[in-house]
Image (cartoon, rainbow, N blue to C red):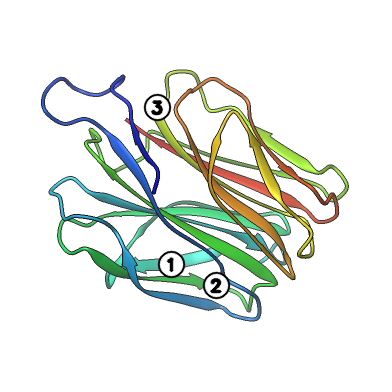
Amino acid sequence: MLTITNLSGFSSGANRPVLTFRFGSDVGSGLSTWTYTSVSIGAASFDRVVIVAFVGRDLSTNFVTSATIGGSAATIAFATNTNSFGSIMYLPVTSGTTADIVVNLGSGTSSGGAVYVWTLTGASSSTPSYTGSNTALSGVGSVSLTPASGSAPIFVAAAWGGSNATANISWTNATSDEANTSAEGGSSGANFSASGVLVTATSSQVTGTMVIAIAGWT
């Protein structure tokens, strides 16, 4: 389990922002709703935020339209799709040590995807101060994004690429929390703490549209 503590950008006092990776999984294909039961979200805390990233491959008309965490509706920070979709969702969850996570697509089933889950405590707000995404066309093999300088001290990132199980995702200027491969492509969830830096996800297989999704908190 990876835990990151970063002090800059937060108010003074006892609270210090802590980002902890909790769960990752290839979600497979042929579904429009994915349910993960009893996902560990760590110890209960008055300021805990559960963060869910969902990335995958599908037609550009298909987006994440809703999600629940522990039975409550999560806020979708953003949802994008250019033949590969990316979405980051979040919800303050102050009680419990596990939660069921459900993600819904709005139009048909996905050709493949993956989910990654973190928890954050000590942030000044549950709402991200930065969100962004980018895509790269098939044949490029990498996709990049630079969060605005000073936008946040702690970020999560997720990426999808390739079109079969030989696709492995690696990162530049971000630390991989977990990577998964499936018959539909490869994915990874990651974290980083420097804004204003070009963050790149690279696929070992260049076929298939790539997507990167990033959100940061202060």
Mark 3, residues whose alpha carbon is within 10 Å: few (<14), some, or many (≥20)? many
Q: Are marks 1 and 2 in contact (CB under 8 Å)?
A: yes
The mark nearer the N terminus, 1 or 3, is 1
Mark 1, residues whose alpha carbon is within 10 Å: few (<14), some, or many (≥20)? some
Taking depth in this image into account, of 62 and 156 the one nearest to the observer is 156
Is 152 above or below relative to 21? above
Is residue 62 visible in the rendered image? The answer is no
Q: CA distance from mark 1 to mark 3?
A: 25 Å
Give the image location of residue 198, x and y in percent. 62, 25
- Dot 2: element: loop
Is 37 above or below relative to 180? below
Which residue is the site of mark 1?
Answer: 66
Kind of residue indicated by mark 2: Gly
Left or right: residue 112 compared with residue 52: right
Residue depicted at 70% across the width and 72% down the height: 111
Left or right: residue 188 compared with residue 152: right
Q: CA distance from mark 1 to mark 2?
A: 8 Å
Kind of residue indicated by mark 1: Ser
Kind of residue indicated by mark 3: Ala
- Dot 1: element: strand
Q: CA distance from mark 3 to mark 2?
A: 30 Å
Which residue is the site of mark 3?
Answer: 152
- Dot 3: element: loop
Q: Which mark identifies residue 106?
A: 2
Left or right: residue 95 compared with residue 69: left
Residue depicted at 30% across the width and 21% down the height: 9
